[in-house]
Image (cartoon, grey):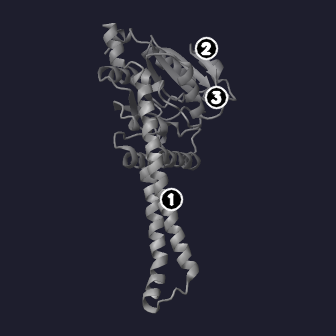
């Protein structure tokens, strides 16, 4: 699919940025070259350098978001920008702009709602060992909890359909937004895809905003939160099982003593064991109730998603 065949679609390139003066000009120029028909938006997140000025000089539409954090910026971009197809990328020149037409072509040809550019690094400095391990770990967690359909859940290079963007609630504040983007698609069982894209090192003078441990912990908390919110019965069943095992462990010596002597000499332990089992059943009851609530909420999200035409439907109207 050539750029000429994309002419009927409104394409928006959305770039969240914080202190990317060194790279943002080249990033904007790269997308202008590869997608000349697209509108390029740079959302400046309280940068202390000349990110906004450099982006504007390169031809981007520059806007700002004062709430700090990538999740806040993505929420603002999805709310403000109106287009048929959205391409989101970081402003640090680590992602390959030349892959953009291929990512969009895959979205259109297969009538998908999201295509993720899976990072394939060509140099050691591009992808730190801690980030590589964390990505594999979190991808494994998400695969086991929500479905094994992605190999790089933390990639910042993604193409979305309009119906994905306008149905995404965007509750995250920081770098955990990529996890939320992934789980949203998995929970609604959207048509999604992946494509390998080159991943390079940052330019000299440009520093990563991602903290391996701090942001890794926040991503883990987000996965746990999404697990509780989207699969509450499973989540609270695990709590029930742990409390039930603890209760049985506490009560077994008391029960053996009672069978031998007919007495309960450790009454506090017996009360604790009974209370722990009651808490376990209370957790299980919460899981059953919340599972019903979650099912209804998921139906509403699905209906909101279906109110927006798919890329395939838009293509049919244009041909």
Residue identified by numbered label 3: 45
Q: Which one is earlier in the sequence, the residue at label 1 or at label 2?
A: 2
Where residue 290 sits: x, y (%)? 48, 47
**Residue at figure coordinates x 58%, y 38% from the top left:** 174
Local crowd at mark 2 within 10 Å, few (<14), some, or many (≥20)? few
Figure quadrant of residue 16: top right
What label does residue 57 carry, if any? 2
Whichever of labels 3 and 1 marks the residue nearer the N terminus, that label is 3
Secondary structure beneath disc 3?
Answer: loop
How far apart are the alpha carbons under marks 2 and 3? 18 Å
State which tag comes first along the sequence, 2 or 3: 3
| Residue holding disc 1 | 282
Q: Residue at 35% x, 23% y: name it.
A: 107
Where residue 44 sits: x, y (%)?
A: 63, 25
Q: Is residue 249 left or right of residue 22?
A: left
Which residue occupies 47% across, 25% down? 165
Note whether 144 is above or below 83 in the view shown: below
Residue 76 lies, with reference to residue 146, above or below; the image says: above
Q: Nearer the viewer, mark 3 or mark 1?
A: 1
CB within 8 Å, label 2 to label 3: no
Q: For this view, does 91 lie left or right of residue 242?
A: right
Q: How many marks overall?
A: 3
Q: Nearer the viewer, residue 63 or 100?
A: 63
Residue 186 falls in image quadrant? top left
Q: Position of residue 197 (x, y in %)?
A: 38, 31
Query: Is any part of residue 121 visible from this angle?
Result: no
Q: Residues within 10 Å of mark 1 (few under 14, many from 20)?
A: some
Kindly check if marks 1 and 2 are in contact, taking CB atoms under 8 A apart as contact: no
């Amino acid at each position: 699919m050539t750029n000429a065949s994309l002419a009927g679609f409104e394409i928006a390139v959305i770039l969240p940025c914080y202190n990317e003066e060194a790279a943002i000009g080249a990033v904007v120029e790269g997308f202008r070259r590869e997608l000349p028909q697209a509108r390029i938006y740079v959302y400046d997140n309280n940068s202390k350098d000349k990110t906004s000025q450099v982006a504007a000089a390169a031809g981007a539409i520059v806007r700002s978001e004062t709430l700090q954090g990538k999740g806040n910026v993505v929420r603002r971009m999805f709310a403000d920008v109106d287009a048929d197809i959205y391409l989101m990328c970081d402003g640090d020149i680590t992602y390959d702009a030349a892959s953009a037409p291929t990512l969009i072509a895959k979205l259109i040809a297969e009538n998908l709602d999201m295509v993720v550019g899976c990072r394939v690094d060509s140099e050691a400095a591009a992808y730190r060992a801690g980030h590589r391990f964390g990505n594999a770990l979190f991808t494994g967690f998400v695969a086991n909890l929500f479905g094994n359909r992605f190999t790089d859940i933390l990639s910042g290079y993604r193409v979305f359909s309009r119906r994905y963007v306008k149905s995404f609630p965007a509750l995250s504040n920081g770098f955990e937004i990529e996890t939320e983007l992934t789980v949203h698609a998995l929970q609604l069982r959207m048509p999604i895809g992946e494509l390998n894209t080159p991943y390079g090192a940052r330019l000299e003078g440009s520093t990563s905003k991602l903290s391996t441990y701090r942001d890794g912990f926040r991503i883990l908390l987000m996965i746990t939160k999404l697990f509780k919110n989207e699969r509450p019965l499973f989540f609270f069943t695990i709590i029930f099982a742990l409390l039930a095992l603890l209760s049985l462990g506490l009560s077994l010596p008391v029960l053996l003593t009672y069978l031998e002597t007919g007495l309960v000499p450790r009454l506090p332990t017996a009360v604790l064991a009974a209370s722990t089992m009651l808490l376990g059943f209370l957790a299980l009851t919460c899981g059953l109730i919340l599972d019903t609530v979650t099912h209804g909420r998921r139906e509403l999200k699905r209906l909101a998603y279906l109110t927006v035409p798919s890329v395939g439907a838009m293509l049919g109207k244009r041909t």
